[in-house]
Image (cartoon, rainbow, N blue to C red):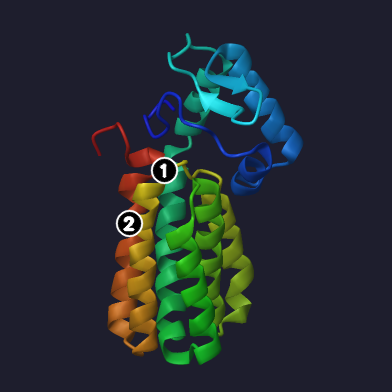
Amino acid sequence: MELGLLEPGERLPSEGSLASTLGVSDITARRAIESLAAEGAVERRRGRNGGTFVAQTRPPAGAAAEAVAAYRADRDEVHRLIDVRVLLETAVTHHAALRATPEQLAELDEHVHAGATATTWADYHEADERFHRGVALASGLTWAMPHYDAVLGELYTYFLPYPISYLHGVNDDHARIVAALRERDVVGSVAAMTAHVSELHRTMFVGLGDGD
């Protein structure tokens, strides 16, 4: 909301979807929404068309502002995680281009389709995670998966609820990566993945609103 990625009046995903996307419990997600509602940052409406919506006017700074400040304090750590992820993604993509089976490529196609048809950022996040883990698994580097999963999971906790139209554009990168993998194009697939993940330095909160 602070960065303008959620517009006034925009409906938020369900508490369950928020919890799943952010990697927290349903109770934690519920309490966070209740806190935002108490501060006037979001509005909760009942009825058939009810739900939780971004408030039309921005409330005074409160506990949420303190949380955002703490989030921003992790800026250097997030850049480090992105750099580590670039190293891991390029390695697994290189090997996936050599080893991916037709069945694994078909699964990646399914994840790309799920991302293209997602209607909320929570749904897209799930498809995105499955896609990237699918590429990693296709590499055959099973020994690297615990470290890969740890870095991916830690970085995902900092992801933002981007507009779905933007995410659909990001998903086009996934389609290009799969096409390169199918052609056994090691150089092309690694280049596409490197550009895709390196972009996080600019599009995550660490790159928004600070002129970097």
- Dot 1 alpha-carbon crowd within 10 angstroms: few under 14, some 14 to 19, many 20 or more: some
Q: Residues within 10 Å of mark 2 (few under 14, many from 20)?
A: few
Which secondary structure lies at badge 1? loop
- If you read the primary sequence from the N terminus, does the residue marked by circle 2 or circle 1 appear first? 1
- Identify the residue at horizontal 63%, vertical 13% (top origin): 38
Q: Position of residue 150 (x, y in %)?
A: 60, 59
- Which quarter shows the C terminus? top left
Considering every residue shown, the one lying at the far top of the view is: 60
Which of the 4 image quarters holds residue 72?
top left
Q: Is residue 1 left or right of residue 179?
A: right
> Which quadrant of the view contains residue 194?
bottom left
Extreme-right residue of the structure? 27
Residue extending furthest toward the front: 48
Q: Provide the residue designation for mark 2.
A: 169
Amino acid beneath label 2: Gly
Q: Quadrant of residue 40?
A: top right
Q: In the image shown, does 62 or 18 lie closer to the viewer?
A: 18
Mark 1 is on which residue type? Tyr
Residue 73 visible, this orientation: no
Which residue shows up at 56% across the image and 85% down it? 140
Q: Considering depth in this image, is 94 or 126 the residue closer to the camera?
A: 126
Picture coordinates of residue 112, whole percent (x, y): 45, 68
In the image, taking residue 31 as reference, residue 167 lies left or right, namely left
Residue with the mark numbered 1: 162
What is the x, y in percent for residue 63? 58, 16
Identify whether 136 is placed above or below 75. below
Q: Secondary structure at mark 2?
A: helix
Where the N terminus falls, by quadrant? top left
Front-most of residues 188 and 48: 48
Residue 121 visible in the picture: yes
- Residue farthest to the left? 211
Q: CA distance from mark 2 to mark 1?
A: 11 Å
